[in-house]
Image (cartoon, rainbow, N blue to C red):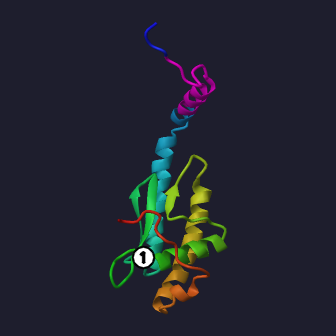
Amino acid sequence: EEVFFSFTAGGEAVALAACLATLEKVERLNVVDHLWRQGAVLRDRFNERARSAGLDALVRCVGLDPRTVVEFSHPGSGEPWAALKGFFQQECARRGLLFTGAHNLCLTHGGEEIRRALDVYGAVLDLAARAVRDGAVESRLAGPPPQPVFRRP
């Protein structure tokens, strides 16, 4: 009588049931193990391809297995190289792979999906190596390089 408690979806139980069903499926299908396993394969083989292309000092995939990012470093300063990242994104998109700089794996990313991504990455790393060697990364961009979303003040 002294407290009034109310909220819009107070009696809504569908979301709770969906959450419970999702958690049960994640456990039953070993989704967490799958993400760690596939992420390790993707990271390690990406780095092998970067090394083969001669770009391992400039391009590397880092992070925890299920959530990796690809870093692009400028050869002179070691600072992030937006033009090389943009070139990489551009060429991946031309080959049907949307690449944002990070890998967000899910259960449906099986061996075939990882192989397909790595095939595209291998081809694009070779192109990137040629562009770096020719000093032509910026000139081979179809548009401006990507800009950081979060900037330091």
Q: Amino acid at mark 1?
A: Arg
Q: Is residue 117 magenta?
A: no
Which element is circle 1 on?
helix
Instruction: Return the residue found at the far front.
Output: 2
What is the x, y in percent for residue 47? 43, 69
**Residue at image mark 1:** 51
Above or below 81: residue 148: above
Q: Is residue 10 magenta?
A: yes
Write down the region rendered in magenta.
5-24
Q: Nearer the viewer, residue 37 or 93?
A: 93
Above or below 17: residue 88: below
Asked if residue 40 shows in the view, the reply is no
Please identify the quadrant where the C terminus is shown. Answer: bottom left
Instruction: Return the residue found at the far top.
Output: 1
Which residue is at a point 50% across and 46% down the rendered structure image?
34
Asked if residue 24 lies left or right of residue 43, the reply is right
Which residue is at a point 60% across and 76% down the rendered structure image?
91
